[in-house]
């Protein structure tokens, strides 16, 4: 009845968005800017929430998608004038931490893993195998820089230098984002931007998180015991829910499992 009486104050509502999995574009990505657009817009705009809480459990992934998601969160928060709180579960590392740092405050479990502020590129080399099998690799390009790091050809020093330059640029963008968002909260720690990770209270000590705590008690402490939670979830594509794209889904699950395994999870 309360909702129909204008002079009675409604209980505060916190919109909760769960961000679970690796970050990548396209159908293979569990988290992407496109897949989260509708969920985030509803969370910030529906029902006038007093805050948006992000439940984050992500080992990272695409730097571009991480940046786009983080930028969308900040844009919606500024437009709605709604504060954002991130609550880290198992891990918010690399791109996962990029998204977490878009929040105004970050909370972690005592065993949560945070950080990994760095950029990684991994591949393989199969040119020796091809030679042993008597297979010749043939590549033709227009433009001397068109082909780079072909796994079926020997490594080229110029290609390695180009890759290192690109990784360095992405790393600097990541560092700038974290410094902009966390500011004076960050400790003067030489390992902060080396890709190192921290657990629970240690992450708080270096300024990557604001406190150790969990969502419900933290939000009740801030907005009162009557605070309500409204959850917004990503919806899987219809075909995927009926078992289609099984091969693609299986490969995505394997890749995601490998990302979490990097942190012992």
Image (tube, helix red, strand yellow):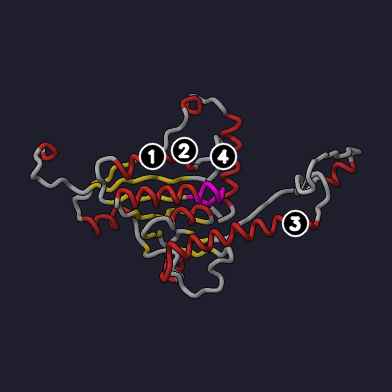
Considering depth in this image, is 126 or 261 the residue closer to the camera? 126
In the image, taking residue 219 as reference, residue 23 lies left or right, namely right
- SS for callout 1: helix
Circle number at residue 152: none
Circle number at residue 160: 3
**In the rendered image of this protein, does residue 223 appear above or below residue 72?**
below
| Pointer 2 residue | 35
Q: Residue at 39% across / 37% down in the picture?
A: 38
Residue extending furthest front? Answer: 143
Q: Is residue 91 visible?
A: no
| Pointer 1 residue | 39
Find residue 116 and report its image quarter: bottom right
Quadrant where the N terminus is found in the figure: top left
Q: Is residue 70 visible?
A: yes
Q: Residue at 36% across / 60% down in the picture?
A: 105
| Pointer 4 residue | 253
Tell me the distance, in whole angstroms, between the alpha carbons under discs 4 and 1.
Answer: 22 Å
Instruction: Give how far across and how far down residue 45 sits, in percent.
Output: 30, 42
Do the residues bearing badges 3 and 1 touch, measured as CB atoms within 8 Å? no
- SS for callout 4: helix
- SS for callout 3: helix
Q: Is residue 120 magenta?
A: no
Q: Which residues are magenta?
A: 58-67
Of mark 4 and mark 2, the one earlier in the sequence is 2
Between label 4 and label 1, give the one nearer the viewer.
1
Task: Judge the density around disc 1: few (<14), some (14-19), many (≥20) Cα neighbours within 10 Å.
Answer: some
Tell me the distance, in whole angstroms, between the alpha carbons under discs 4 and 3.
Answer: 30 Å
Tell me the distance, in whole angstroms, between the alpha carbons under discs 3 and 2.
Answer: 33 Å
Instruction: Give how far across and how far down residue 242 sits, in percent.
Output: 48, 24
Between label 4 and label 2, give the one nearer the viewer.
2
């Amino acid at each position: 009845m309360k909702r129909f009486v204008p002079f009675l104050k409604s209980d505060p509502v916190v919109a909760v968005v769960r961000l679970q999995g690796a970050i990548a574009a396209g159908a293979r990505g569990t988290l992407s800017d496109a897949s989260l657009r509708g969920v985030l817009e509803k969370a910030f705009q529906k029902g006038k929430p007093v805050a948006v809480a992000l439940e984050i459990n992500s080992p990272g992934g695409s730097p571009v998608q991480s940046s786009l998601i983080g930028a969308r969160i900040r844009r919606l928060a500024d437009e709605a004038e709604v504060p954002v709180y991130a609550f880290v579960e198992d891990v918010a590392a690399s791109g996962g931490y990029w998204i977490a740092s878009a929040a105004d405050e970050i909370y972690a479990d005592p065993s949560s893993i945070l950080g990994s502020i760095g950029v990684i590129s991994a591949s393989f080399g199969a040119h020796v195998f091809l030679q042993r099998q008597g297979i010749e690799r043939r590549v033709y390009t227009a433009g001397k820089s068109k082909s780079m790091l072909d796994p079926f050809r020997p490594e080229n020093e110029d290609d390695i230098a180009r890759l290192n330059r690109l990784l360095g640029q992405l790393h600097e963008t990541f560092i700038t984002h974290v410094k902009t968002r966390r500011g004076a909260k960050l400790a003067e720690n030489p390992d902060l931007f080396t890709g190192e990770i921290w657990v629970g209270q240690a992450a708080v000590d270096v300024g990557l998180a604001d406190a150790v705590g969990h969502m419900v008690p933290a939000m009740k402490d801030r907005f009162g015991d009557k605070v309500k939670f409204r959850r917004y979830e990503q919806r899987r594509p219809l075909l995927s829910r009926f078992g289609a794209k099984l091969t693609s889904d299986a490969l995505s699950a394997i890749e995601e499992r490998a990302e979490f395994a990097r942190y012992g999870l």
